[in-house]
Amino acid sequence: MDAEKTVGMSFRVTPRTKLLLVAAAESERRSLTNMLEVLVEDFCARNGISEEKTTPSKAGSNGERRARR
């Protein structure tokens, strides 16, 4: 099995969000990165979101989508 190439990301969260992510990762014995990947993949699976549904016209100039509030 080929390893999937990774990309760097940088973003800011509130201290509370970081504490919650750390707590979730520790409870699952995962790294912060792996926990975030699991959470995003689970959210997308539950909401019918797939890579095929993300088009360049819906993404930013570098493929990132803006967060909705």
Image (cartoon, grey):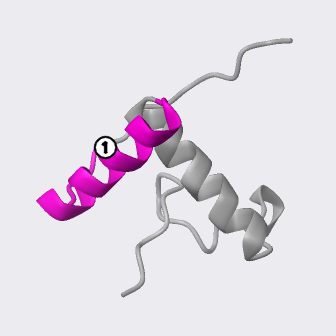
Residue located at (26% from left, 61% from top): 17
Q: Residue lying furthest left in this view?
A: 15
Quarter holding the N terminus is top right
Confirm whether residue 37 shows in the render: yes
User: Can you tell which quarter of the image residue 6 is in?
Assistant: top right
Residue matched to label 1: 22
Residue located at (77% from left, 64% from top): 45
User: Can you tell which quarter of the image residue 47 is in?
Assistant: bottom right
Query: Looking at numbered disc 1 in the image, what kind of residue is underneath it?
Result: Val
Residue located at (24% from left, 52% from top): 18
User: Can you tell which quarter of the image residue 48 is in?
Assistant: bottom right
Q: Residue lying furthest front in this view?
A: 27
Q: Is residue 65 above or below residue 20?
A: below
**Residue 49 % position (x, y):** 75, 69
**Residue 64 % position (x, y):** 48, 58
Q: Residue lying furthest right in this view?
A: 1
What type of secondary structure mainly makes up the magenta span?
helix
Viewer-closest of 20 and 44: 20
Viewer-closest of 17 and 7: 17
Q: Give the magenta part as a residue range.
A: 10-30
Confirm whether residue 55 shows in the render: no
State left or right for residue 51 relative to residue 26.
right
